[in-house]
Amino acid sequence: MNGIKLHYKVTLTKNMKTTQFVTDKEIILPRGKVGTVVEIYEQGKAFEVEFANKNGQTYVLISLELEKLMLLHIDCSNLTF
């Protein structure tokens, strides 16, 4: 079990060549780029990951195997509201 679920934040473990969602322009997503899981395939062997800009607009949707992703954990123990 890898612990990755829908809407979880993940990061790339290596650079990925892909195309922009709207323009079809070829780009490279750098290792460490953070995205959101929007679909799970083959019982967690692969994932559809969305990458968005600062305004929340999607610029890449890409299917990635588990080995190319790392689950991000956020420590909320020090947060105050």
Image (cartoon, rainbow, N blue to C red):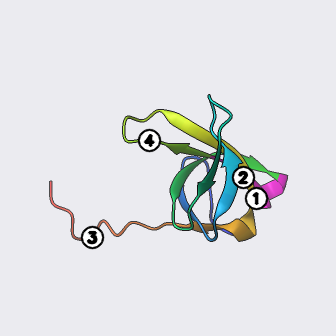
Q: Residue placed at 49% from the left, 66% from the top?
A: 72
Q: Secondary structure at mark 4?
A: loop
Q: Secondary structure at mark 1?
A: helix
User: Which residue is disc 4 drawn over?
Assistant: 53
User: Which residue is disc 1 drawn over?
Assistant: 44
Marks 3 and 1 in Cβ contact (< 8 Å): no
Q: Secondary structure at mark 2?
A: strand
Q: CA distance from mark 3 to mark 1?
A: 28 Å
Residue 46 counted in the magenta span: yes
| Residue 39 visible in the snapshot | no
Give the amino acid at mark 1: Gly
User: Which residue is disc 3 drawn over?
Assistant: 77
Give the amino acid at mark 2: Phe
Which of marks 1 and 3 precedes in the sequence? 1
Q: Secondary structure at mark 3?
A: loop
User: Which residue is disc 2 drawn over?
Assistant: 47
Give the amino acid at mark 3: Ser
Marks 2 and 4 in Cβ contact (< 8 Å): no
Q: Residue placed at 42% from the left, 35% from the top?
A: 56
Nearer to us of marks 2 and 4 is 4
Give the amino acid at mark 4: Asn
Nearer to us of marks 1 and 2 is 2
Q: Position of residue 67 (x, y in %)?
A: 73, 70
Q: CA distance from mark 3 to mark 4?
A: 28 Å
Tell which residue pokes out farthest to the top in this image. 22
Q: Position of residue 74 (x, y in %)?
A: 39, 66
Which of marks 4 and 2 precedes in the sequence? 2
Q: Nearer the viewer, residue 7 or 67?
A: 67
* Mark 1 residue crowding within 10 angstroms, few (<14) / some (14–19) / many (20+): some
